Image (tube, rainbow, N blue to C red):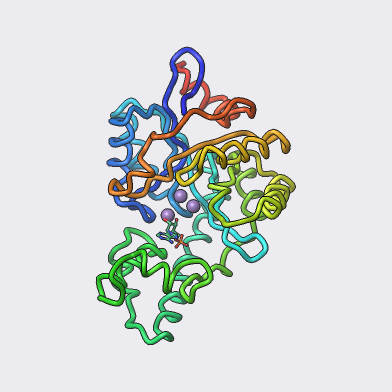
Amino acid sequence: MHIDGHSPLLTDLHCHSTASDGGLSPASVVARASENGVGVLALTDHDTIAGMGEAREAAVADGMHLVSGVELSCLWRGQTIHVVALDFDPDEPGFLQVLEGQESVRHQRAGTIDERLRKQGLPSVLEQARDLAAGVPGRPHFARALVDAGVVPGERQAFQRYLGTGKVGDVATCWPELAVVVGWIREAGGIPVLAHPRRYGLTNNKLRKLVQAFLDAGGQALEVLSAGHSPQDSGYLTRLCLDGGLWASGGSDFHWPERPWSELGRLPELPAGPDPVWRHFRRETQARLQGE
Ligand code: AMP
Ligand code: MN
Ligand code: MN
Ligand code: MN
């Protein structure tokens, strides 16, 4: 996926570091992206921008453009949905407060996940999950901790049995509503992007309803390109963009080097039609991207 214009820049607008559930430090994510030829990157850790300072320093050293990003967890009709915020003002006090709120929700939620697992007769792994996380532990840290404790043979089984959608450790009700989160992002001058819309297991009909709710709340872009999206998925999402006047975004959703299906910068070109989201970045960001 390239930024068009005079100097095409390979662009990746969704990835994770150890600040959330990724395997590489923010600086290593930037270095790896740079090695892969990425020129514009958004680090979008789950509900935190704790990695942004380190990423920004590394980006300056590597001559890479870093766009502010975060992936916020929220609820729509009781289901967990992810909204990526791009190009917001990272110093906006209101938004920093929002992120503090999400962090405290995550702390409480970690306790609830542990409680629910213990009610199943499993040992407590909260402390181990905390040790595995640089910040607040999420479900992937619990999965790893359950493997280390010998409860399950692999993380896949941990999700299948205990942590995946609808399982006992899938604590979702704590998140704010989709419309609230979209409003927060707009107030911080950011662009709300509906993350990986084809990965929620929704029928076309229900996905259209989600996109309508996202639009009504002030949502502006869909992640047309994402790991796990087939060309058909991207084609369908392109149509949804055109129908709703939404912009198109794309990101690898990179977490770990060992998972080659979501390598940094490995994205096809955005399908023609909808406006690429980067055309709508703030003027100062545009200027940076064009080397002004
Ligand atoms: P959380 O933010 O704590 O709800 O954790 C969600 C994260 O867990 C996602 O962003 C993925 O990185 C990971 N995840 C979700 N479902 C699975 C799964 N079935 N197998 C492996 N990882 C998963
Ligand atoms: Mn994740
Ligand atoms: Mn996600
Ligand atoms: Mn993600």
Q: Residue at 49% of width from left, 28% of height from top?
A: 269
Q: Residue at 25% of width from left, 71% of height from top?
A: 148
Q: Is residue 278 visible?
A: yes
**152 vs 240: above or below:** below
Q: Position of residue 85 (x, y in %)?
A: 54, 44
219 relative position to 292: left or right:
right
Q: Position of residue 256 (x, y in %)?
A: 32, 49
- Single out the residue that lies furthest toward the front: 232
**117 vs 250: above or below:** below
Q: Is residue 87 visible?
A: no
Q: Position of residue 91 (x, y in %)?
A: 50, 42
78 relative position to 72: left or right:
right
204 relative position to 15: left or right:
right
- Dividing the picture into quadrants, the one containing residue 63 is top left
- Single out the residue that lies furthest toward the top: 6
Which of 4 and 30 lies nearest the eye of the viewer? 4
Q: Position of residue 276 (x, y in %)?
A: 58, 29
Q: Residue at 48% of width from left, 54% of height from top?
A: 47
Q: Residue at 68% of width from left, 52% of height from top?
A: 210
Q: How many marks?
A: 0
